[in-house]
Image (spheres, rainbow, N blue to C red):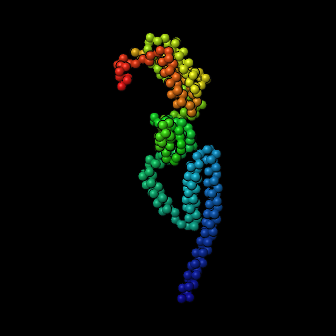
Amino acid sequence: MEAQLSFYWQKISTMTLEYLPKLALAAVVLWIGLRIIRQFSAWTTAVLERHQVTPDIRPFFGSIIGVSLKILLFFSVAGIVGIETTSFVAVLAAAGFAVGIALQGSLGNFAAGIIILIFRPYKVGDLIEVQGNMGYVVEIQIFNTVITTLDNRTIIIPNTTTANGVVTNLSTRKHLRIDLKVNIPYSEDFNRIEELLLDALRQTPKVLDQPAPFVGIEKMDSHYLVVTARPHAKTEDYWDVYFAAYRHIKRALHDNGVQVAYPEDITLGDIGK
């Protein structure tokens, strides 16, 4: 019995002498590593804030970076202690591959969201148009971009759509040109029509003086002249000017006895229906 206790005591002493330095070194590495990771996560969050990344996104990026670095630290500490990490790496690789296949579309949206946040083709508050949907950017999420359309609808657009498709950012310019079209009979004097339309545009609220409004013939159709009126307005006043300009143009044409032309295959009776 005494010999057996002596054997176990010797074995414990040997293991202690063998693993104690490794455990001490692992503890030191773990303590220093956690402090570095904490400081690096805070620095990352500060950088994202400096680049005006939305507050909802900053904690997510901070947590992703923190978790990734802690996983690497865990493997480093396990290797110092002497634990075989090859099997852990193989299991994590297999799990990551399976998750990647299952969430291929979501991961694509995630990557696209990162690209949007880094290169900032648009930001919260911008007026954009994507695949025929025009609206103000409300939120840039990890997987989607949320916009509110001008008729107050909420549209959720996958980030891959905006990252890989054509996005028109109307907020990058201080003013926009508005194209208005009016069909005028050939019998009307264009110089007179031009003056009437320019005067109507000048009387429209929020139309900019510079660049000055323009009126010209866009094309000569088989039945009428297609006249284009082009006022400019601030981006936020685009739709106010659009509807108000048409209203002033209609009033100017009516007050001066100008009849708007219609295609020959449309009768006045059809228009009233």
User: Can the viewer see residue 98?
Assistant: yes
Q: Residue at x 61, y 66 (%)?
A: 26
Residue 164, image x, y percentages: 48, 39
x and y percent of residue 265 in the render? 35, 19
| In the image, farthest residue toward the front | 255
* Quarter of the image where the N terminus is located: bottom right
**Front position in the image: 86 or 225:** 225
Is residue 220 in view?
Answer: no
Q: Would you place residue 221 above or below residue 145 in this image?
A: above
x and y percentages locating residue 99 in the rendered image: 44, 54
Which is more toward the observer, 49 or 260? 260
- What quarter of the picture does the C terminus occupy? top left
Q: Is residue 71 above or below residue 2?
A: above
Residue 82: where, in percent of width, then height?
A: 56, 67
Name the residue furthest bottom.
1
**Image side of residue 224 versus residue 126, left or right:** left
- Please determine whether, in this image, residue 257 is positioned above or below residue 178: above
What residue is at 50 percent from the left and 59 percent from the top? Answer: 89
In this rendering, would 187 be left or right of 20? left
Which residue is pictured at 56% across the width and 18% down the height? 199
Q: In percent of the image, x 63 and y 53: which residue is there?
A: 42
How many numbered marks are there? Answer: 0
Q: Is residue 137 left or right of residue 37?
A: left
